[in-house]
Amino acid sequence: MIETTEMACQDRLDRLLLALCRIESLMNAGFGEREEVIRSCILALLANEHVYLIGPPGTAKSLIVRTLSGFFEQMSHYETLLHGTSKLQELIVPTLAGKSLLSCHIVFLDEVFRAPRDLLLGLLSFMNERIFHCPDPTHVPLLTLFGASNQSPSPADGLEAFYDRFTYRCILRPIESRDRFFQMVFQADEFSGKIDEWNEDGELSPDFFPLIPKLSGKRLSWGQETRDGLYELRRSLGNEGVFISDRRWKKVVLAATVNALYQGASSVLPKHLSGLKNVLWSYPTEIRPIERILSSYR
């Protein structure tokens, strides 16, 4: 019976991965030069981890999150714009639609680093353990939290613990390609129609997503070559002055495993480490040396 249940879960996982691939394809067709960001958002959902989007205004940070959320009809979505006087208590008061920080599977906090420090630090257990203290501990259905901003925190802000909760970090820049630029400014928005026509939401129910990290760990093994590659990656990053905490390395392993799962692999190979850029950098100045190091794993 246990084996049958395991096989059913793995079969359901396969169908879910196909559905996510179709969503990714639809989004890539509509968004210019956002493939890496869209992939990171989908991997974050598979890993039950959080995403930080940074970029100047008008680079589709909010639109990407709203569009992706629109494909998940069974998942509740909560969005709010934070500012310097925002209070944590305000986020747990239900809206007219009955949604709050405590009731939704996908949460989007826009202008997240404009919020007061005590509000952000109050979200640590909410993001990590899925428990909110108000004041008694309350378990929440959160799967993934998206935070967006046009600025990153500095070490002086004292927000390292909160910033570290974002396993995936993505930079969005203005569109550079001539063709993509014309597509963006002249093409009508077709996403609403694509979402309305979407009929595979049964594969994307929120009850299954918390099982995926464990299922991926059972399906994909780490061979010695990949383990050695991971350790060499750690050593190389250290030589470049890129420090990653032991706790975050566990997130790196999860991200690599989910990356291999999404690519249809049967085990985690050294090449799957090459897609970890958005998991490894903390500050933009680290991106170039990280890219150089990861290029050797392709």
Image (tube, rainbow, N blue to C red):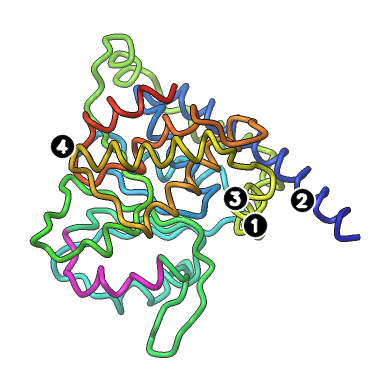
Horizontal and vertical percent position of residue 93: 38, 77
Q: Are marks 1 and 4 in contact (CB under 8 Å)?
A: no
Which amino acid type corresponds to the residue marked 1 in the rendered image? Answer: Leu
Image mark for residue 73:
3
Which amino acid type corresponds to the residue marked 4 in the rendered image? Answer: Thr
Which residues are drawn in magenta?
114-127
Q: Residue at x 54, y 26 (%)?
A: 25
Image mark for residue 288:
none
Looking at the image, residue 145 sits to the left or right of residue 290; the answer is right
Q: CA distance from mark 2 to mark 4?
A: 41 Å
Residue to which mark 2 is pinned: 9
- Which numbered disc, 3 or 4, marks the residue closer to the eye? 4
Helix, strand or loop status at disc 1: helix
Q: Residues within 10 Å of mark 2 (few under 14, many from 20)?
A: some
- 92 up-or-down from 228: above or below: below
Q: Are marks 3 and 2 in contact (CB under 8 Å)?
A: no
- Which numbered disc, 3 or 2, marks the residue closer to the eye? 2
